[in-house]
Amino acid sequence: MELTQIRLLVSDFTVVYRFYRDVLGLKPQFEAESGPYAKLSPDTGQAAIALQDRTQMADVLGRLRTEPEGYRALVVLRVDDLNAAHAELTSRGAEFTRGPSPMGDRMRVAYLEDPEGNLIELQEWLVLREQARSSPA
């Protein structure tokens, strides 16, 4: 078995697509602003976020919950400088639910939501796992 992607099912495809493309700065594999599907990636790495129109998926399945309650997804993005990323995304219109703050002694995090309410965590790694394992206790 091989994981190929994680898809977020969204109700307002165009708004969410623009958020991931324009606010977060992810690069679409192809332009698909009107949907019903898109895959977007950061500048580095192989990870990608796929978006799928909820109505289109409901048509495929014959049914689908229309309004999930509570957080249903957490998208995690690593950044080199959390303060700089926070400032840049805020200037693009992002509204953070929690600003940069420590999470343990190995990372700092900040949280925001996409237009559909999916939670996004930005991480700045202070100590890489390899460094933490090799350092004396």
Image (cartoon, grey):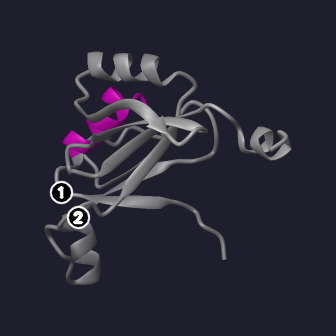
- The answer to which of 69 and 130 lies nearer the viewer is 130
Q: Quadrant of the C terminus?
A: top right
- Which quadrant would residue 66 be assigned to in this image? bottom left
Residue 21 rendering spot, x and y as whole percentages: 36, 33
* Label 1 CA crowd tier, 10 Å (few <14, some 14–19, many 20+): some
Residue 20 rendering spot, x and y as whole percentages: 35, 37
- Residue at the spot 53% in from the left edge and 30% down from the top edge: 79
Check disc 1 and report its element: helix, strand or loop: loop
Q: Is residue 81 above or below residue 20?
A: above
Q: Quadrant of the N terminus?
A: bottom right
Visible residue check, residue 79? yes
According to the image, label 1 marks what residue?
A: 11
CB contact under 8 Å: marks 2 and 1: yes
Q: Residue furthest front?
A: 137
Q: CA distance from mark 2 to mark 1?
A: 5 Å
Q: Which residues are magenta?
A: 14-26
Residue 133: say if magenta.
no
Q: Amino acid at mark 2?
A: Arg
- The answer to which of 35 and 42 lies nearer the viewer is 42
- Residue at the spot 22% in from the left edge and 84% down from the top edge: 62
Mark with earlier residue (2, 1):
1
Residue 100 rendering spot, x and y as whole percentages: 39, 29
Q: Is residue 100 above or below residue 115?
A: above
44 displayed left or right of 21: right
* Label 2 CA crowd tier, 10 Å (few <14, some 14–19, many 20+): many
- Which quadrant would residue 56 be assigned to in this image? bottom left
